[in-house]
Amino acid sequence: MPQRAVTPPPPEDEPKYLTVVHPYPLNANMELSDDRRNFALWLACCTGKDPIYAFFHQPAVSGNAIFDIAS
């Protein structure tokens, strides 16, 4: 059986996305500016000095947030 080719590494300019399940504050309403601010500050404490470019959420999917950070 032929062996599958090795997957090439992603390019340097490709964004890095991470997912947070059950982010702080719990049961946050990301439509409210205070909850978004608290989440962004908590996320900045967790990721260290890497800049956060953006974070995304879907109101229909509670308990998940996706954010884009520098490589």
Image: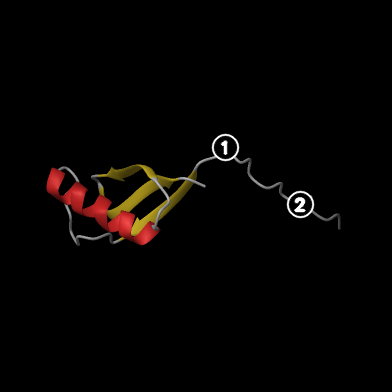
Q: Residue at 20% across / 48% down in the picture?
A: 37
Q: Residue at 31% across / 55% down in the picture?
A: 43
The answer to whether one can see residue 32 in this image is no
User: Closer to us: mark 1 or mark 2?
Assistant: 1
Residue 70 position within the rendered picture, expressed as x and y whole percent measured from the top left: 47, 45
Q: Nearer the viewer, residue 51 or 58?
A: 51
Q: Quadrant of residue 58?
A: top left
Q: In the orientation shown, which residue stands out farthest toward the front? A: 49
Look at label 1 and name its amino acid. Answer: Asp
Look at label 2 and name its amino acid. Answer: Val
Q: Residue at 37% across / 48% down in the picture?
A: 66
Q: Nearer the viewer, residue 48 or 17?
A: 48
Q: In the orientation shown, which residue stands out farthest toward the right? A: 1
Residue on which disc 1 sits: 13
Q: Quadrant of residue 28?
A: bottom left
Label 2 environment density (alpha carbons within 10 Å; few <14, some 14–19, many ≥20): few
Dot label at residue 65? none
Q: Is residue 26 left or right of residue 56?
A: left
Residue 12 position within the rendered picture, expressed as x and y whole percent measured from the top left: 61, 41
1 or 2: tag closer to the N-terminus: 2
Q: Quadrant where the N terminus lies?
A: bottom right
Residue on which disc 2 sits: 6
Label 1 environment density (alpha carbons within 10 Å; few <14, some 14–19, many ≥20): few
- Indicate the secondary structure of the residue bearing disc 2: loop
Q: Quadrant of residue 41?
A: bottom left
Q: Is residue 11 left or right of residue 64?
A: right
Q: Residue at 27% across / 59% down in the picture?
A: 23
